[in-house]
Image (cartoon, rainbow, N blue to C red):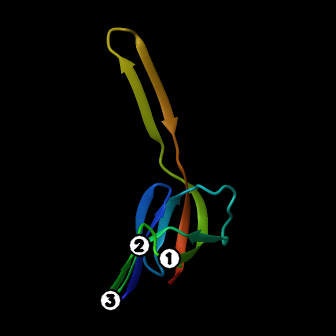
Amino acid sequence: MSEYAIVQHGGKQYRVAPGDELMVERTEPDLEKGDSFLFERVLFLGSGETARVGTPVVDGALVRAHVVAPVRGDKIIVFKKKRRKGYKKTQGHRQNYYRVHVDAIEA
């Protein structure tokens, strides 16, 4: 069976396995393509019939990954309005992400 882990990063939880690619929030500034990226908050490890659940994290567990590319997400439009008051405000936001490739799960 395949080995997988559930990690926490940037306030979100991700299910990852070796070889997966995912987009995570850019919490560490200025990482370039090829730089190493570590997920230190491993909440769960699963491999076939065995499972290790952390309280809240699994001791000694680590997920190693590397940065494929720093990217930016789609633009989100934030529009505020108060009726009958003539108040309108439009604002945009683009979140910064890292596209990372999971290399190994170490327990």
Q: 24 or 44, which is in the foreground?
A: 44
Is residue 49 rendered to the left or right of residue 79?
left
Residue 102: image tag? none
Is residue 81 rendered to the left or right of residue 72?
left
Q: Quadrant of residue 36?
A: bottom right
Q: Which residue is mark 1?
A: 59
State if disc 2 and disc 1 touch (CB < 8 Å). yes
Is residue 44 rendered to the left or right of residue 32?
left
Q: Percent from the top left, x then y, of residue 98?
A: 56, 61
Mark 1–mark 2 distance (CA, rounded to whole Å)? 7 Å
Report the amino acid beneath label 1: Asp
Quarter of the image with the N terminus is bottom left
Mark 3–mark 2 distance (CA, rounded to whole Å)? 17 Å
Residue at 50% x, 35% y: name it: 92
Q: Which residue is mark 3?
A: 48
- Going from N to C along the chain, the mark reached first, 1 or 3, is 3
- Going from N to C along the chain, the mark reached first, 3 or 2, is 3
Residue at 46% x, 70% y: name it: 57
- Going from N to C along the chain, the mark reached first, 1 or 2, is 2
State if disc 2 and disc 3 touch (CB < 8 Å). no
Residue that sits furthest to the left in the current view = 49
Q: Percent from the top left, x then y, of residue 18?
A: 47, 81
Residue 54: image tag? 2
**Circle 1: element type:** loop
Q: Nearer the viewer, mark 1 or mark 3?
A: 1
Q: Percent from the top left, x then y, of residue 7?
A: 45, 68
Q: 25 or 79, which is in the foreground?
A: 25
Report the amino acid beneath label 2: Gly
Is residue 102 rendered to the left or right of residue 67?
left
Neighbor class of circle 2 (other Cα within 10 Å; few <14, some 14-19, many 20+) is some
